[in-house]
Amino acid sequence: MLVDVGVLRVVPDFASQSLGAATTFYTEVFGLQPVMDHGWIVTLADPDRPIAQISLMTHDQTAPVVPDTSIQVDDVDATYEAAVRLGYEVVHPLTDEPWGVRRFFVRDPDGHIVNVLSHPG
């Protein structure tokens, strides 16, 4: 049974040893600009196509691992329920984070960690 959830955006997440150096690289080489910076994660976007984004992370603030990708959905609760019902490993529980997202991490069949999130409200 397929879940009826809309995917709003997909953002690759790159583990980084130096957010400053990585940000400079993606800014200078690709022209991406910071659109979010929490100190441990920086999201960069194309100024002309803001949906084209990447995130750079030194660690995750509340989860045990840096995810491989983030997928923003319109119904994170339904996606969580589908992942659990289908038996996929939840790496980080469904959580309302202090920076304004509701999310969970799930491991895909190849071992990739997916940060599934929505912006409530």
Image (cartoon, rainbow, N blue to C red):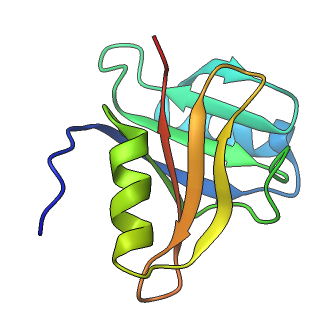
The C terminus sits in image quarter: top left
**Residue at image x 21%, y 43%?**
5
**Residue at point 33%, 62% (across, down):** 82
Q: Position of residue 100 (x, y in %)?
A: 65, 19
Q: Nearest the camera: 78 or 104?
A: 78
Q: Tell me: residue 19, above or below residue 32.
A: below
Asked if residue 95 lies left or right of residue 1, the reply is right
Left or right of 59, for residue 115: left
Percent across and percent down for residue 76 are: 41, 41
Q: Which of 47 and 61 lies nearest the eye of the viewer? A: 61
Q: Quadrant of residue 33?
A: top right
Q: Quadrant of residue 43?
A: top right
Give the residue displayed 44% in from the left and 55% down from the top. Answer: 80
For this orientation, the residue located farthest to the bottom is: 110
Q: Which of these two is toward me, 90 or 22?
A: 90
Left or right: 47 with respect to 14? left
Residue 24 at least partly seen: no
Q: Is residue 102 visible?
A: yes
14 in relation to 101, above or below: below
Residue plotted at (42% across, 82% down): 87
